[in-house]
């Protein structure tokens, strides 16, 4: 592009792109810009906006892709979580009401204690199945009980005198599991 010259003094003319006029560096005279200069400025302006728009579109595409990816991962996690059968909130109870629901929870027992009670919940089970409780006192098997349910589970073992002091373990098996799905430990303390 040819350099513009001032119409009054012949000096160098600066182009003001905002106002679309030429201003002389020396005398300040303003003049209209020739057609080709205007077209060139407009062309560059359009190109700049086009690049900006393309860049934005690429960013948007990437954001949408990442969002979809995260949503997919989230859905997969939810599906896997909802399909796995597991036992939760296993607790020690003191008494059961007529519905076999605990009336009081405890963290350990004190002798003399006749009933040892463990309750919990089965999750993601569609139909009633069997849960097996294997009770151990200081490593020795003392009792095995079974409970049929699809949600709430419990096991209660009774001793006419008192259960001895020591460490107890309750292994809980869902259906025909070979290894325990949950292991619960507690102690019986002497007064
Ligand atoms: Zn001038």
Image: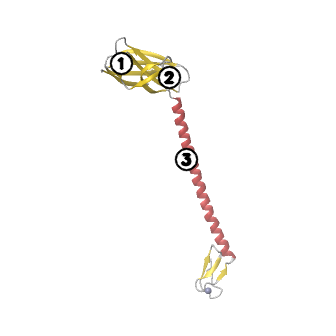
| Residue of label 2 | 152
Mark 1–mark 2 distance (CA, rounded to whole Å): 22 Å
Crowding near pointer 1: few (<14 within 10 Å), some, many (20+)? some
Point out which mark residue 136 bears: 1
Residue 160 percent coordinates (x, y) = 37, 11
Q: Which residue reaches farthest left?
A: 191
What colour scheme was applied to this rendering of the protein? secondary structure
Point out which mark residue 66 bears: 3
Residue 48 as seen in the image, left or right of residue 109: right
Crowding near pointer 3: few (<14 within 10 Å), some, many (20+)? few
Sooner in the amino-acid sequence: mark 2 or mark 3: 3
Q: Residue at x 48, y 25 (%)?
A: 121
In front: label 1 or label 3: 1
In front: label 1 or label 2: 2
> Does the rendering let one see residue 182?
no
Mark 2–mark 3 distance (CA, rounded to whole Å): 40 Å
The quadrant of the rendering that contains the C terminus is top left
Report how many numbered discs are placed on residues in the image: 3
> Does the rendering let one see residue 76?
yes
CB-based contact (under 8 Å), mark 2 and mark 3: no
Sooner in the amino-acid sequence: mark 1 or mark 2: 1
Q: Residue at x 43, y 15 (%)?
A: 145
Name the residue nearer the viewer: 153 or 31: 153
Name the residue nearer the viewer: 20 or 96: 96
Name the residue nearer the viewer: 93 or 172: 93
Residue 10 as seen in the image, left or right of residue 80: right
Q: Is residue 1 above or below residue 152?
A: below
């Amino acid at each position: 592009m040819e350099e513009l010259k001032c119409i009054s003094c012949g000096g160098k003319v600066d182009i003001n792109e905002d106002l679309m006029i030429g201003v002389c560096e020396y005398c300040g005279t303003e003049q209209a810009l020739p057609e080709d200069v205007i077209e060139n400025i407009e062309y560059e302006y359009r190109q700049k906006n086009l690049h900006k728009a393309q860049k934005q579109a690429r960013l948007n595409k990437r954001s949408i892709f990442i969002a979809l990816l995260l949503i997919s991962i989230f859905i997969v996690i939810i599906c896997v979580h909802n399909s796995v059968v597991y036992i939760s909130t296993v607790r020690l109870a003191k008494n059961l009401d007529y519905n076999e629901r605990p009336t009081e929870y405890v963290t350990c027992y004190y002798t003399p204690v006749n009933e040892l009670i463990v309750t919990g919940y089965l999750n993601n089970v569609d139909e009633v199945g069997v849960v097996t409780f294997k009770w151990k006192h200081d490593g020795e098997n003392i009792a095995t009980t079974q409970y049929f349910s699809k949600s709430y589970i419990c096991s209660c073992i009774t001793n006419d005198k008192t259960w001895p002091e020591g460490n107890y373990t309750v292994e809980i098996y869902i259906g025909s599991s070979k290894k325990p799905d949950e292991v619960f430990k507690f102690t019986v303390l002497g007064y």
